Amino acid sequence: MYNCQRGNDVPLKQFTDTKLALGCDTTLTIVTKTTSQEVSRIFNMLWLEIFKFEKKFSRFLPDSELSKFNRNAGIKTEISKEFEDILRVSNEMSEKTNGYHNPFVLPALHRFGYEKSFVSKHDDSSFESHSADQIVDYTNLVVSTGFATIPKNTSIDLGGCGKGYLADKLGKIISKYKIDGFWFSIGGDIIARGNNESNTSWQLTIQDADKPTT
């Protein structure tokens, strides 16, 4: 169900829709003067992109491109153009953060118990996540045109980098429509542009780690 709130001073309407996707709450908010029917069409188009991305890149789905790639660890593997783009973004983020972003952390996630999806439809007892016991430097993710390679006994997880990539993709898609603003959150990975229903800039609150209750 869509929530609609009319601003006090301007004839803008805010529509919000939330679903469980990519293992987290995903929220799409659009501010526009267009009809609710058109907004519904835009939401459906955005959700289709989100679930297509999930089907292709979730590590909890045995037939996803990511799962197949991890099972081919140690072998130069042909990949799709979109997967190549994401992996190049991952390497770029690793370089910008001096290696703090490392897609090879999946074994550590398993050790801390994050082996099963929080999404019930991904609960497949016949599928065991690819087992890897090595956490290596991000430079071991080698990407070339149409191909990528990771070392044997390793695996990668797109994590927040994948969600950020998707958020940017959704932002480019919706920029083609007549809207005044939008705010998307994919499990906390956020993209926002334009104005809110009050025709003012979006404001985001970031919790202070030293003062978690304020």
Image (cartoon, rainbow, N blue to C red):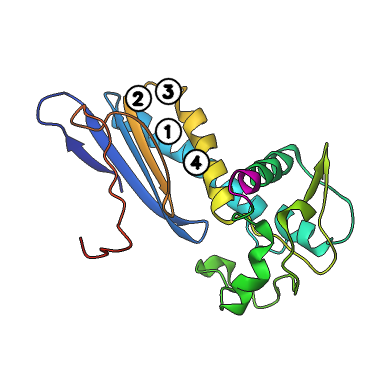
201 is within the stretch colored magenta: no
Question: Which three-letter amino acid code belongs to the residue tagged 1?
Answer: Ile
- For the residue carrying disc 4, how many other residues have a C-alpha within 10 Å: few (<14), some (14-19), or many (20+)? many
The part of the chain drawn in magenta is 93-98
The amino acid type of the residue labelled 2 equals Ile
Q: Quadrant of the C terminus?
A: bottom left
CB within 8 Å, label 4 to label 2: no
Q: Whole-Å distance between the Cαs marked 4 and 2?
A: 17 Å
Q: Is residue 60 left or right of residue 137?
A: left
Left or right of residue 123, residue 135 in this image: right
Identify the residue shown where x is 22% and y is 65%. Answer: 213
Task: Inspect the image, locate mark 3, and give the three-letter code of the amino acid beneath it.
Answer: Tyr
Residue 204 in the image: state x and y as whole percent. 29, 44
- The image position of residue 61, as x and y in percent, is 66, 62
Q: Which mark is residue 179?
A: 2
Residue indicated by mark 4? 167
Tell me what residue is drawn at x 66 percent, y 51 percent. 56
Residue 204 vs residue 148: left or right? left
Q: CA distance from mark 1 to mark 3?
A: 8 Å
Residue occupying the point 65% across, 45% down: 95
Q: Are marks 1 and 3 in contact (CB under 8 Å)?
A: yes
Q: CA distance from mark 1 to mark 2?
A: 10 Å
Of badges 4 and 1, the one in the foreground is 4
Comes first in the chain, label 4 or label 3: 4
